Image (cartoon, rainbow, N blue to C red):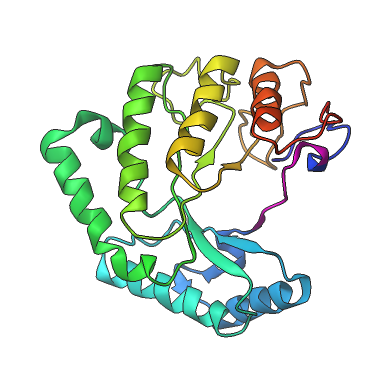
Amino acid sequence: MRWDKLPGSFSACGMRDMTIFYESALVTNRSVDLAKLDKVAAQIRSAKPAIVTLNIECWDPATASGRDKLIRSIERIRSKIPSSVKLGYWGIMPGYAYPDYVAGGSRLTKQRSANNAMRPLAAKCDWIMPSLYTYDGNRTRWAKFADVILAEANAYGKPVMPWVWPQFHDQSPDKNLRYQLIPGGFFRSELEKARAKADAVCLWGTRKAQSGGAIQRLAWQPKASWWRETQVFLKATGNASKSCNL
């Protein structure tokens, strides 16, 4: 997470940094870029992080051509880094498709078919990293979505690390919710869902609404209810020390 005016780090709270390489560092003109991939691999060899997330959203893993590019990319990096470094793709597998998971029926069947087509890619990943971002303010609907997508993620037979975002999705149909911080009780339920049905959880953020230019970050709010509930969660699960008072 990146915040403006953050007074320290999250290390005392038992939270580790995640190494992420975004699409611009991996892809050129929607094509596999071996030079970029080799540069990323060199950075990984130097830093030796425990887990690395690759973020490529321009290729559809449910299609043969998109899946092939994703497989070629992760295989290229894997061939040049220590086996101790674990790799995963953010958010694309299983697909996000919030409305389809909630709707059920034929829409869910179609999405499950797409998720199943991604199995050859899942076999190349050490972690499955679905997005559990909050699309609207309905907690019951979110829980239904989370149950289905986590079941789909676990079906790949790999460790699962969902990503949560302490803000409402920037594409929420409710424009008044976009970028707003999620209430504490709601966010705590998201952390508990991840704890019950996954192997780890990654917290990502932040963003402010903008009209172009550089990404703007939210200012740190130590008394925000989502953070208070997160601290309680981390301490209750034995991850945070008593000095987790950021």
Where in the figure is residue 1, as x and y percent of width and height? 69, 40
Where in the figure is residue 233, as x and y percent of width and height? 64, 27
Where in the figure is residue 174, as x and y percent of width and height? 42, 18
- Left or right of residue 8: residue 186: left
Q: Residue pushed farthest left?
A: 106
Asked whether residue 84 is drawn in magenta, I would say no
Q: Main secondary structure of the magenta part?
A: loop
Residue at point 48% right, 75% down?
73
Residue at point 65% right, 73% down?
40
Residue 170 seen from this side = no
Q: Which residues are magenta?
A: 12-19
Residue at point 67% right, 64% down?
50
26 w.r.t. 115: above or below: below
184 w.r.t. 23: above or below: above
- Left or right of residue 125: residue 84: right
The one of 13 and 102 positioned closer to us in this rendering: 13
3 w.r.t. 121: above or below: above
